[in-house]
Amino acid sequence: MIVSNKTLKKISKIKNKTRRIILYGVVKNCDMYAVTPNDSKFYLKGHTLVAEWNEETWHTYKNNMSDPFETWHVPLDAEESFKTLVHDHAQ
């Protein structure tokens, strides 16, 4: 398992049970995983992509996000979308 205990602890604090289950499923069983130089983490499972934003990014947008996770459903080329997202946030 790639996911850290710190990440699992953050997910466990999410109140929405459905969201918690989805996040656990993706981060624990991901097909692709990447960490950017600024420490944001990205997980891809099938066509579901999860970003775990670094502390600085999360605190910048905290008013709009209750936790550091963002989820997308990528209907087409999920691997290419994953690589593009990671590349764009590695700058």
Image (spheres, rainbow, N blue to C red):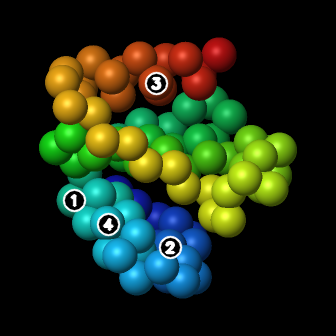
Residue in view at x 41 percent, y 74 percent? 20
Task: Quickly name the residue at label 1.
Answer: 29
Front tag of 1 and 4: 4
- What residue appears at the point 56 percent right and 32 percent down from the top-left corner? 36
Name the residue type under label 2.
Ile
Q: Earlier in the sequence, mark 3 or mark 4?
A: 4
SS type, badge 4: helix
Sequence-wise, the earlier of marks 3 and 1 is 1
Q: Secondary structure at mark 2?
A: helix
Toward the viewer: 34 or 22? 22
Q: Amino acid at mark 3?
A: Leu
Q: Relative to residue 50, is residue 14 drawn left or right?
A: right
Compare marks 4 and 2 and give the one earlier in the sequence: 2
Q: Which residue is mark 2?
A: 11
- Kindly indicate whether the residue at mark 1 contacts the one at mark 2 (C-beta within 8 angstroms): no
Which tag is nearer the camera, tag 3 or tag 4?
Answer: 4
Residue pointed to by mark 4 = 22
Q: Which mark is residue 85?
A: 3
